[in-house]
Image (spheres, grey):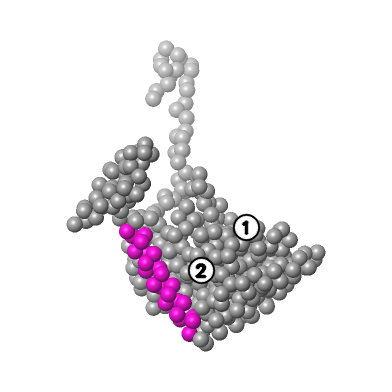
Amino acid sequence: MEHPENNEAYKGLVVNAGIEQPSSVNPYLKRKVKKRQLSVNEFVEGIVKGDVTILSQAVTLVESVRPEHQATAQEVIERCLPYSGNSIRVGISGVPGAGKSTSIDVFGLHVLEKGGKLAVLAIDPSSERSKGSILGDKTRMEQLSVHPKSFIRPSPSAGSLGGVARKTRETIILCEAAGFDKIFVETVGVGQSETAVHSMVDFFLLIQLAGTGDELQGIKRGIMEMADGIVINKADGNNMDKAKLAAAQFRNALHLFPAPDSGWTPRVLTYSGFYNLGVKEIWDMVYEYIDFVKGNGYFEYRRNEQSKYWMYESINEQLRDSFYHNAKIESMLQEKEQQVLKGNLTSFVAAKSLLDTYFEDLK
């Protein structure tokens, strides 16, 4: 655009055109190219070679809710099955604040000293309001998170422990195929997730604290019966006597329960995760248990029972999804719900009506 000052009417006044202005966009900025998703063959080859990046991408696919991702994930899992099953799977649970993450850091370094590779799968609780999750377990495993032979993967529970548990089981298969011969599964805390985790591990370790009042109050009978070993953390300094007393109380409590199917007598030990005291004794117990159950055939039996359990769990989950995503059911749900709330229908009659409609639609 010409400057009006350069008109003849303004003799003696000249305004130069100036220099060309550079583009506002950085010329060195590279466009982000969308990554191509790997094929099933590439996933399987990468996992079997022990490529942690490809393993992480495969786990992300397993956790995805998109149907196309799920289809690829299931195919990858199926192809990895022949390479799985060669690990020791340990479930680690305990009351919140018992020091699970710190203990896993110490336990992990101890087992890695003997060689092999370790995968830690931590189920992180999600907020019921925001559905968000901190996924902060990795920050508490300071030494393990930088160890070249470890793989730590936190997963948000997202309000569905059953779904997460199934995906965790599938992740175990992928980790085993990638050469991880020790798998730790850390649970949310004391609650229903323990049952799901117990159904996918070989050894269930329960971490307890001493000096918190009634020592048996923090744990329920069902979880006590699941434990193959109970360990009292923070057994150091002034807390040593309390830890020994708590251990004696737990031993007495275990005598009241029926003997486990494995034939193993659960033990109670004390240790200090912070000071790394008594850790060797815990892992001697775990290895002794594995040798014991492999010797009497219970190890193989339990794994077969777990596979059967997850088959039925998968059927239940698929049926539930199919029911709630049925077009007729989706249109009827709100109406039936309102009738139940107004007292016009009982919940059982409403449920039967919905199920009858669903099964009729399948014919």
- The answer to whether residue 111 of the structure is visible from this angle is no
Going by the numbered disc 1, the residue's amino acid type is Pro
Query: Which label is found at residue 96?
Result: 1
State the image coordinates of residue 272 (x, y, percent, origin top left): 71, 68
- Left or right side of 125 for 233: right
User: At 31% across and 48% down in the image, what residue appears?
Assistant: 349
User: At 74% across and 68% down in the image, what residue appears?
Assistant: 245
Magenta segment, prevailing SS (helix, strand or loop): helix
How far separated are the C-alphas under marks 1 and 2?
A: 18 Å
Dot 2, how many residues are within 10 Å of its Cα: few (below 14), some (14-19), or many (20+)?
many
Does 102 appear above or below 291? Answer: above
State the image coordinates of residue 73 (x, y, percent, origin top left): 37, 64
Locate residue 312: give its quadrant. Answer: bottom left
Q: Which residue is mark 2?
A: 198
Q: Which residues are magenta?
A: 297-319
> Which residue is most to the left?
363
Does 61 appear above or below 25? Answer: below
Is 302 included in the stretch rendered in magenta?
yes
Locate residue 57: give its quadrant. Answer: bottom left
Q: Secondary structure at mark 2?
A: helix
> Which residue is most to the right?
238
Nearer to me, 55 or 360: 360
Q: Secondary structure at mark 1?
A: loop
Dot 1, how many residues are within 10 Å of its Cα: few (below 14), some (14-19), or many (20+)?
some
Going by the numbered disc 2, the residue's amino acid type is His
State the image coordinates of residue 129 (x, y, percent, origin top left): 50, 44
Does 86 appear above or below 102? Answer: below
User: At 32% across and 62% down in the image, what residue appears?
Assistant: 71
Label 1 with label 2: CB-CB less than 8 Å: no
The N terminus: image quadrant: top left
